[in-house]
Amino acid sequence: MFKKTTKAIFSAILATPIALMALADDKVTITVWSMDGHDLGNEDTHRQVIAAFEAEHPNIKIDLTLLPESGLEDRMNTAIGAGGKLPDVFPLLSGEWAPIALDLSPYIEADPELSQDMYAEPFWRTRATFGDSVVALPTGIGANVVLYNKDVFDKAGVEYPTADWTTEDFIKKAVAVTDKANGVWGGDRPRDAYRAIWHNYDAQVYSDDSTTVEGYHNSPQSLAAYQWYWDLVHSDATPTKAEIDVLGTEGTGPVDLFIAGRLGMATLNQSHMLRALKEGVNFGMVPEPAGPSKDRHANAWSATPAIAGNSEHPQEAYEFLSFWAGMEGQYISMTTGLNMFPSIPALWKDHPYIDHPAIQTFRTTLDWPLVRDFDGTHLCWRAALRRVDEVYELIGLKAIERNEIKKALDKEVVVLQTALDDCVSRLGS
């Protein structure tokens, strides 16, 4: 169905000026580091993709290492920092890794089976490119949405949320369905600042040119988003951070609490939605709530495997990457793992749950401006915010009063500016 012909592959290789083809009888080993789960698929999915690829490419062997997300980040950062050996293929988890990734542009131009037009535009725009280079190929995609448990809402006699709801509606409904006596919280909390909710308040951490924090992190829009978060925390309608850490599953937030009927609402993604379907949860799904902004934003992403720029076998690595992230590999991932939603729209019609209303809600959010439109073009946003921001943590711990937030943001501007300047000087961006 999707199999590349030998002639097409051979023609593509000959047309690639920087690639050297291994002789047919020389088996090349390509090392791949990946993660079990997320939008790359589980271990079984990885193995099936690899088995199908190796059957079509007998001269290439794939050496797969699966790691947890934190372990993969640590291992990659250590190898990059020490100038050590990198895997040939790896997920581009951090934008700071983009400069060490191979530019795929000449390989794609020479490949008759793969093109930019195959992929959903938002994810090519925000995940595949770095400057003028193509540094990764989008595979499974995801977006945050709010799942609500209909049984919890029905028991509390509360109307379900609707697609046009607001951040204030979120708090009101969370309070209304909370049942502490039975261990039920009404909702969860944002994982950190400056995701979709902050963008729905028109807030961003620093200026578009990556130079200025003053007037952005402490802007009226940012203050309003932090104050909304304070109101949510002090509603006592959500688990505390410690409770989520203890009761939830690492890397997935409160999905287990939602599946167990202990959360009325949870900000999850389409893979969690598919899990809820399999486990028979009676749920509905709406986009994240609107704020004062005229635009609704989506916190959407894609798994993005890349090739190390110093790979000794770039052509063979590209053969695997283009298979894994191409039609055939994504079809295997979609139909085996079932939690994976492909980045190639031509495959969507074959998804087992494509007609489910929740999937239609998910697809609607993909047409909105993406949080990644800012994050993905600013390699320093993570260093300037996530590694430094204390105001968000203080609010979550109830260690700051509402009327103290503005002063705390003003004070934090200096710290964030220093972090931003340091990052920009290191990365030259």
Image: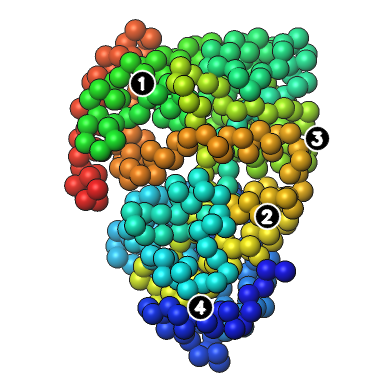
The amino acid at mark 3 is: Gly
Whichever of labels 1 and 3 marks the residue nearer the N terminus, that label is 1
Q: Which mark is residue 347?
A: 2
Whichever of labels 2 and 3 marks the residue nearer the N terminus, that label is 3
Q: Which mark is residue 12?
A: 4
* Residue lying at 77% horizontally and 48% vertically, measured from the top left: 352
Direction from residue 52 to residue 191 in the image, left or right:
left
The crowd level at tag 4 (other Cα within 10 Å; few <14, some 14-19, many 20+) is: some
The crowd level at tag 3 (other Cα within 10 Å; few <14, some 14-19, many 20+) is: few
Measured along the vertical axis of the image, is residue 387 above or below residue 284? below
Query: What kind of element bears circle 1?
Result: helix
Whichever of labels 2 and 4 marks the residue nearer the N terminus, that label is 4
The amino acid at mark 2 is: Leu
The reply to whether discs 1 and 3 touch (Cβ–Cβ < 8 Å) is no
Per the model, the C-alpha gap separating discs 1 and 2 is 39 Å
Frontmost residue, 391 versus 25: 25
* Residue lying at 32% horizontally and 30% vertically, measured from the top left: 205
Query: What kind of element bears circle 2?
Result: helix
Residue under label 3, please give it. Answer: 280
Can residue 42 be seen?
Answer: no
Residue under label 1, please give it. Answer: 222
The amino acid at mark 1 is: Ser
- Residue 216 in picture, x, y percent from top left: 29, 25
